[in-house]
Amino acid sequence: MSNFDQFSRPSDLNQSTQLVRNKVLRNTYMLLALSLIPTVIGAVLAMQLNLFVGMSPWVSMIIFFAGAFGLMYLIEKNKHSSMGIVFLLGFTFFMGMMLSRILTVVLSMSNGGDIITMAFGGTAVIFAVMAGIATTTKRDFTFMNKALMIGVIVVILAAIANIFLQMPALTLTIASLAVIIFSLLMLVDIQRIVNGGETNYISATLALYLDIYNVFVSLLQILGIVGGDD
């Protein structure tokens, strides 16, 4: 048997495929951890400069969508080069700046620090649980992706509508749905990496970062409404 035939055996191919998947997952987790640094820097800088204090919710929303979708486009366009990482870190810095608005509101509460800690801890627990399920179960959860994306659109439209309505009950409902939807998206996105459906770690990091970011923000909203002390 030739060397090529030996390498091409199913067992060798399966092992090689598994090594690639493990590498993508490892690189994704490393880049995801790195992306939290510019997020924190962006949030702290924006709060120090009071960038969004008194800004109209509509203006803030336009800045958010323009900046977020513009940078996501650049990330995907450059995901096969080192510039993809640069744009990803720029994106997480921008998202940190946008996070400063809700952080400022929460920190104005007497127990704001505790709320942020609980939201961060809750997000970490959700991520750990979803990662554990995705990497150990044989059940395929990717069938949920289409329904979850529809759910994301519904949440976005409801959030835009609530800019007019300013209803705390609706905010709480939207945030609760967002926690469920983006938690399940974590499960789907991690499983796509584990099963080889996503082979680019930059795209994988972007997807997981958005899941984690939205769960954290939603938990902040829930805890701020339910347990916030003025």
Image: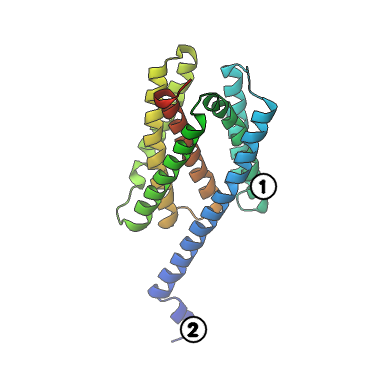
Identify which residue, 139 or 50, lies in the foreground.
Answer: 50
In percent of width and height, residue 95 lies at 59, 35
Q: Is residue 185 visible?
A: yes
In percent of width and height, residue 147 lies at 35, 36
Mark 1 surroundings within 10 Å by alpha-carbon count, few (fewer than 14), some (14 through 19), many (20 or more): some
Residue under the image location 55 percent in, 50 percent down: 33
Location of residue 11 with respect to 183 vertically, above or below: below
Q: Quadrant of residue 65?
A: top right
Residue under the image location 29 percent in, 53 percent down: 139
Task: Identify the residue under disc 2.
Answer: 3
**Circle 1 — which element?**
helix
In percent of width and height, residue 189 lies at 43, 47
Identify which residue, 141 or 106, lies in the foreground.
Answer: 106
In which quadrant is the N terminus drawn?
bottom left
Looking at the image, the residue that sits furthest to the left is 139
Task: Identify the residue under disc 1.
Answer: 86
Looking at the image, the residue that sits furthest to the top is 165
Q: CA gap, disc 1 to disc 2?
A: 41 Å
Identify which residue, 174 or 81, lies in the foreground.
Answer: 174
Q: Earlier in the sequence, mark 1 or mark 2?
A: 2
In percent of width and height, residue 50 lies at 67, 25
Q: Amino acid at mark 2?
A: Asn
Q: Quadrant of residue 176?
A: top left
Mark 2 surroundings within 10 Å by alpha-carbon count, few (fewer than 14), some (14 through 19), many (20 or more): few
Q: Nearer the viewer, mark 1 or mark 2?
A: 1
